[in-house]
Image: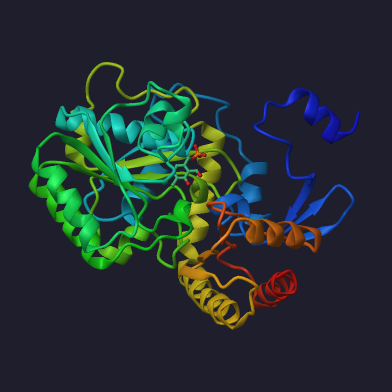
Amino acid sequence: MDTFSKDKRYIARESAPIPLNIVRTDGSCMYDARGKRYIDFYVGWCVGNIGWTNARVREARRSFRGPDYFSPTYANRLWADLAELLVKITPAGLNKIYFTTGGTESVEYALQAAMSHTKRAEFISIEGSYHGHSIGAMSVGDSEFRKHYSNLLPRCHKIKAPLDRKAAQKIVQLLKGGRVAAYISEPVVCNLGVEIPTRDYFKTVAHACKRYGTVLIIDEVATGFGRTGTLFGAEHYTLNPDILCMAKGLTGGYSVLGAVAMTNAVAKSMQWNFSFYSTFGGHPLNTAIALENVRYIINNKNQLLSNANRIGGYFVQRLTAMEFRHQPVIHTKGLAIGIHFPNTAYPSAIKRRCRENGLLIAGATPESIIMFPALNLPHGLAREGLDIFEQCL
Ligand SMILES: Cc1ncc(COP(=O)(O)O)c(C=O)c1O
């Protein structure tokens, strides 16, 4: 039975997979089973930030000689070293790290910690956003989830984009009641097609969270590790969140790991029996690989970020000069690029044509196209990919 027939027979899915059977990755390219090359302009949705097949990280994976496993109740050097690094590079005030299996678990844990810290149960988040697929993460995500699950957390207030002074004022009104455990959002909302809050918005929200005792959770699962041209998106707004969620770029796709950074006060509020536990969160092999990936990012930070900003500028220049059949609105921050169209048929046809012509892109909403290329995307591949994109308009 071929791969697609077997997939159809055995894999639980909402619909048929994209007809691509990827067997190999290399830099900013993927190859299918027939050897066809695809330029990868979305790296698994902000996962492969340093590109695929990085020799150093792959070597760390190959040569790992540590324990196969240890219970999270033991101490281990790998955890201590990675936690130390993450505390150093995340915004000031985040002093403790908890390791998880990925983004959803990081968000789930952040919501729990906010409830434990404040003894409150309401949340504020952004309408249409995405924070993962657990009951808690879906509760603060897109309201569409409520159509299918009637039992999501009941008091989650949703704020509609644009995230400007007016939206911030709505949040201040909600916070005044003193019942909101946490505000949660991405710093730049990748999952809304790169929605960029104003500086005013975050200044007001952060200030009000402090004033009314609400935990500020910044979800950097997608934006973390350079995506928006700074190591963390929070840096654009000089934010000092109480909790920051990480995954994706933490391992670059070379292993499976999430992490939650939190203040000492939040961590302390979770010190009750069995509050911190995840069997595979912080698995030793995954932690060793993430450690090498983060070290690589730190050692090459200047080149990665300056390339992201330079190539990001090139994307803007090319995209704004293209002739689209339906004129889009383009949102960009670093190498997070969202292209919003007035209809759904056009972006979906472009995506299909691009794939047929060897370029992989994605969509955040049915009306949008997003591009999240690797931070070290070479200029030549950026040009080649954008040429394909232009031909497919
Ligand atoms: C902002 C954000 N938060 C959380 C998640 C969930 O992460 P994971 O798929 O690793 O559980 C995602 C996944 O796309 C995300 O983009």
Q: Quadrant of residue 158?
A: top left
Q: Residue at x 68, y 26 (%)?
A: 12
Q: Residue furthest top?
A: 273
Q: Residue at x 55, y 28 (%)?
A: 67
Give the x, y percent position of residue 208: 13, 51
Give the x, y percent position of residue 381: 70, 72
Q: Residue at x 27, y 64 (%)?
A: 237
- Most foreground residue, 2 or 282: 2
Give the left or right position of residue 225, taking residue 54 as reference: left
Give the left or right position of residue 106, taking residue 184 as reference: right
Q: Is residue 218 visible?
A: yes
Task: Name the quadrant of the N terminus.
Answer: top right
Q: Give the colour scheme shown.
A: rainbow
Q: Quadrant of residue 278?
A: top left
Give the x, y percent position of residue 84: 35, 47
Give the left or right position of residue 387, taking residue 209 as reference: right
- Tell me: residue 235, above or below residue 145: below
Q: Residue at x 48, y 74 (%)?
A: 309
Task: Name the quadrant of the C terminus.
Answer: bottom right
Q: Is residue 333 visible?
A: no
- Most foreground residue, 99 or 353: 353
